[in-house]
Image (tube, rainbow, N blue to C red):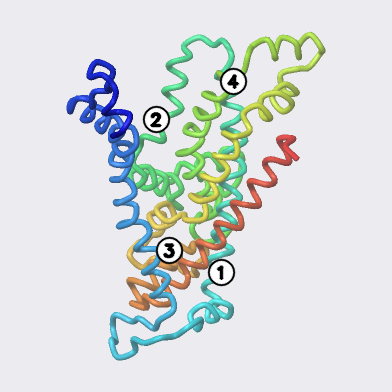
Amino acid sequence: MSLTELRPASHRQAPPPKNVKTRSWLYRFDNKTVPYIFISPFFILFGIFGVFPLIFNGVVALRNWRLDDPTLTGWAGFANFSRLLSDEDFWNALGNTFGIFILSTVPQLLIALIIANLLNRKLRGNTFWRIGILLPYLTPVVASTLVFAIFFARDNGMANWFLSLVGFGEETPLDWRAQKWSAWIAIATMVNWKWIGYNALLYLSAMQAIPKDVYEAAAVDGAGPWRQLWRITVPMIQPVVVFTVILSTIGGLQLFNEPMMFDENPQSASGGSAHQFQTIAQLIYKVGWKDLDLGYAAAMSWALFLIILIVAGINTLLTRRIGGDR
């Protein structure tokens, strides 16, 4: 006979009620299972529309895949990637992409930082100015690009009118689409106009968290506004700066809408008569959906993906170095 049976009935431990077991099970389910259920839709959708297309695109990049001639479909290995090394159109598009990227990203982030620093001061109508700088970001890309295309028109364009005020191009108006440097400046202006305000508000939100005592102590030590910006503000908002650098790198190297709509013949995706402002994203579209060579277009997209990773990593490293994080 066991010890439990020898105990008096009053000292025996009664089994827990069924409702207690149910509550305990519901508690464990609510704490361990429900969170995964709530976040699962994101991962399911990301797997369907993110991971699967990425993997499938990698498979296509290793094949000969032409829509105009199904008989040419077959395994190609790394032939599409080796073809990139001798493709003049690819290197021309790569140079155009980096040229526009530098002209847009560097001034964009610097001007956004300066504007955010100004908005962080006590100004009259702060709300008005903060909303005003965000309006370009709310404007549809196609609409704003079409307006800028008219602004940079060769004949009767306002850009040439402004230049004529300083005596430039009075006899022969500047054709902004004809030369690389002029087309790059025009497209970079479109990108900067749209994204400066967005980045400025990101910087401003980070600046709001910096204690005012830090600036007061720096002012007592004799640090001026410009020195405070680079010695105090930038290092203390470094995570946001790194975020905007990475975001601008991804967007700048994938530039498509602005050069596409800036072209007089957007359907060709040629980036001008001599491909003077054709970006890699435009070239991928042209090769894939105009030339119908999906295998080679997929190889270009993977090359662009690797380039973005490398450039984003370098920019992040340089930004942390500048911000004082060794």
From the image, tell me which residue sits under label 1: 92
The kind of residue on which mark 3 rests is: Gln
State the residue position of label 2: 135
Residue drawn where x is 27% and y is 23% of the image: 13
What numbered label is drawn on residue 282? 3
**Distance Cα–Cα, label 1 vs label 4:** 39 Å
* Earlier sequence position, callout 1 versus callout 4: 1
**Residue 71, picture quadrant:** bottom left
Residue with the most extreme right position:
221
User: CA–CA distance between discs 3 and 4?
Assistant: 37 Å
Identified by mark 4, the residue type is: Leu
Judging depth in this view, the residue of 267 and 182 nearest the camera is 267
Considering the numbered disc 4 on the image, is that residue within a helix, a strand or a loop?
A: helix
Mark 3 element type? helix
Mark 4 or mark 2, which has the lower sequence index?
4
Q: What distance separates the C-alpha of mark 2 from that of mark 3?
A: 27 Å
Q: Residues within 10 Å of mark 1 (few under 14, many from 20)?
A: some
Q: Which residue is mark 4?
A: 118
Q: For the residue marked with disc 2, what is the amino acid?
A: Leu
